[in-house]
Image: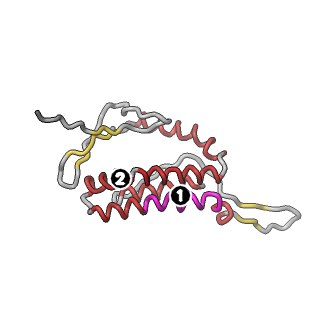
Amino acid sequence: MSRIDVMKTYKLYINGAFPRGESGRVYEVKDSKGKFLANPCQASRKDLREAVVAARGAQAGWVSATAYLRGQILYRVAEMMESRKSEFIDVIVASEGKSVSAATSEVSAAIDMWVWYAGWSDKISTIAGSTNQVSGPFYNFTIPEAIGVVTIFASEKSPLLSLVSAVVGVLTT
């Protein structure tokens, strides 16, 4: 008796939930040899609008968090990636056709990047901010502030590392 393969379907992540796309459409992801890997949901314009609304709603909480807390959260992401490192390596090997050592290097670099930015989260305002000289008996300070919801595009070359390098810098400040 043979088993039926249970194929992975990736859902969207919007506002803390995993809804299927509003359109119900999915697309196939195949490995480097053309073998089926998964069916991710294809987001519609409505899904994008809902994601932007959710991001705007979450922004106030993230901005009001202390830099120390943001660093702790970023470090926790690194811990979770480290605990699931073999899964990330397996996915990269299957989807991109990379060697195990190349996939291991990419995952390790992504984890290291989370840790590095976690350490910088409470120091970045000191480096990026400044005291500006003005003529008068008062002070003028420059500090980095969140500007709102942003869109991030990651490169298709080394997708995991590209995504992490694009996202973690935005989350740090």
In magenta, the rendered stretch is 109-123
Front-most of residues 52 and 64: 64
Front-most of residues 37 and 76: 76
Residue closest to the far front: 1
Query: Residue, x 29% and y 37% (percent of image)?
Result: 26
Q: Which residue is identified by label 2?
A: 88
Q: Amino acid at mark 1?
A: Gly
Q: Position of residue 93 (x, y in %)?
A: 27, 56
Q: Quadrant of the C terminus?
A: bottom right
Residue closest to the far right: 137
Camera-side mark, 2 or 1:
2
Q: Which residue is identified by label 1?
A: 169
Front-most of residues 14 and 1: 1
Q: Quadrant of the N terminus?
A: top left
Q: Position of residue 114 (x, y in %)?
A: 50, 57
Relative to 139, is 161 on the left or the right?
A: left
Q: Earlier in the sequence, mark 2 or mark 1?
A: 2
Relative to 150, is 23 on the left or the right?
A: left
Q: Residues within 10 Å of mark 1 (few under 14, many from 20)?
A: some
Identify the main secondary structure in magenta: helix
Q: Amino acid at mark 2?
A: Phe
Q: Is residue 120 magenta?
A: yes
Relative to 148, is 28 on the left or the right?
A: left
Q: Position of residue 54 (x, y in %)?
A: 52, 37
Query: Could you say whether the residue bearing mark 1 is in a helix, strand or loop?
Result: helix
- 77 relative to 27, above or below: below
Q: Are marks 2 and 1 in contact (CB under 8 Å)?
A: no
Query: Residue, x 47% and y 62% (percent of image)?
Result: 112
> What is the spatial separation of the Cα atoms under label 2 and label 1, in whole angstroms?
21 Å
Front-most of residues 48 and 101: 101
Query: Could you say whether the residue bearing mark 2 is in a helix, strand or loop?
Result: helix
